[in-house]
């Protein structure tokens, strides 16, 4: 089952799409043990700058874009508001045509939205390619999307901290569905990363293993 969390931002009348297909419902590889956390750099384009043939483009709309706070290590990543007043974050500029962007709300699926960028507050030089995937995730960067060992999928929660439950005074950094949150950042004590998880009304957190992390 697909779970989309939609939120109206007061005063802006923007429909904010926070999470796509996270939380309960379908479980991806829930019975397979995790021997090592896999990390991936999100890039919806091929080496030649074309949209990946694996993606299913659900819609084409115009949008205005600005820097994203979800992915800070990729200069081609954007936060875009479509002409339908829907917020897409993150989106990625076409390396060969910065007037085109592709938004993937859930990198574990093959669905995306293509945007015609009519305004970009941080324009890039045409032809600038996305950064090459690093050998390992940069220490200062954080994943914008994670899949846990039991199949739950969680995305960054931005600008909604006042509405979310805190743990020891700290708000969650990821939402995994209804009243299901991750706190702090992925910890890598071994090859399997872990995160602090709080579900429902329970006041304490417990560590959960991360199967995949997207940057």
Image (cartoon, grey):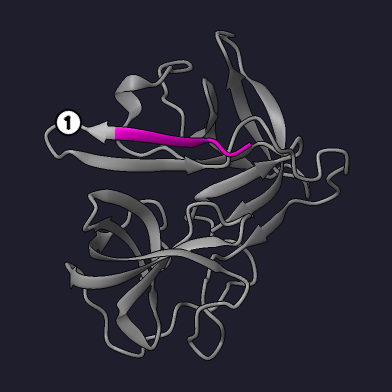
Q: Quadrant of residue 121?
A: bottom left
Q: Residue at x 57, y 13 (%)?
A: 200
Q: Which residues are magenta?
A: 1-7
Which is more toward the observer, 212 or 179?
Answer: 179
Report x, y in % for residue 9.
22, 34
**What residue is rendered at 66% in x and 58% in y?**
39
The correct choice, above or below, for 110 with respect to 193 in the image is below
Choose between 113 and 37: the one closer to the eye: 113
Instruction: State left or right for residue 18 relative to residue 121.
Output: right
Q: Quadrant of the N terminus?
A: top right
Residue 152 is drawn in which quadrant? top right
Q: Is residue 141 magenta?
A: no
Compared to residue 51, the image places residue 113 above or below, namely above
Q: In this rendering, would 148 be left or right of 61? A: right
Picture coordinates of residue 117 (x, y %)? 25, 72
Judged from this view, the residue extending furthest toward the front is 59
Element marked by disc 1? loop
In this view, the residue in front, 106 or 60, is 60
Q: What residue is disc 1 on?
A: 10
**Front in this rendered view, residue 55 or 190:** 55
Q: Quadrant of residue 199?
A: top right
Extreme-left residue of the structure: 11
**Is residue 6 located in the magenta-colored stretch of the structure?**
yes
Badge 1: how crowded within 10 Å, few (<14), some, or many (20+)?
few
* Residue 158 spot, x, y in % from top left: 35, 39
* Residue displayed at 29% across by 49% down: 86
Q: Is residue 37 left or right of residue 73?
A: right
- Image coordinates of residue 49 in percent, x first then y, are 48, 86
Q: Is residue 21 above or below residue 105?
A: above
Residue at point 11%, 34% (across, down)? 11
């Amino acid at each position: 089952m697909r779970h989309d969390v939609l939120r109206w931002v007061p005063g802006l009348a923007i429909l904010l799409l926070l999470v796509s297909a996270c939380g309960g419902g379908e479980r991806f590889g829930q019975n397979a043990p995790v021997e090592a956390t896999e990390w991936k750099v999100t890039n919806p384009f091929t080496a030649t700058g074309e949209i990946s043939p694996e993606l299913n483009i659900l819609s084409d709309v115009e949008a205005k874009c600005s820097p994203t706070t979800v992915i800070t290590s990729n200069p081609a990543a954007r936060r875009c508001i479509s002409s339908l007043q829907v917020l897409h974050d993150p989106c990625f500029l076409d390396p060969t045509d910065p007037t085109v962007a592709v938004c993937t709300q859930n990198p574990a699926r093959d669905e995306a939205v293509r945007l015609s960028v009519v305004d970009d507050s941080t324009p890039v030089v045409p032809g600038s390619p996305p950064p090459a995937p690093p050998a390992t995730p940069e220490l200062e960067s954080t994943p914008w999307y994670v899949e846990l060992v039991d199949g739950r999928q969680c995305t960054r929660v931005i600008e909604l901290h006042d509405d979310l439950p805190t743990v020891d005074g700290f708000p969650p950094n990821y939402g995994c569905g209804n009243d299901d949150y991750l706190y702090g950042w992925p910890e890598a004590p071994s090859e399997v990363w872990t995160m602090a998880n709080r579900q429902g009304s329970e006041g304490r957190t417990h560590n959960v293993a991360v199967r995949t992390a997207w940057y």
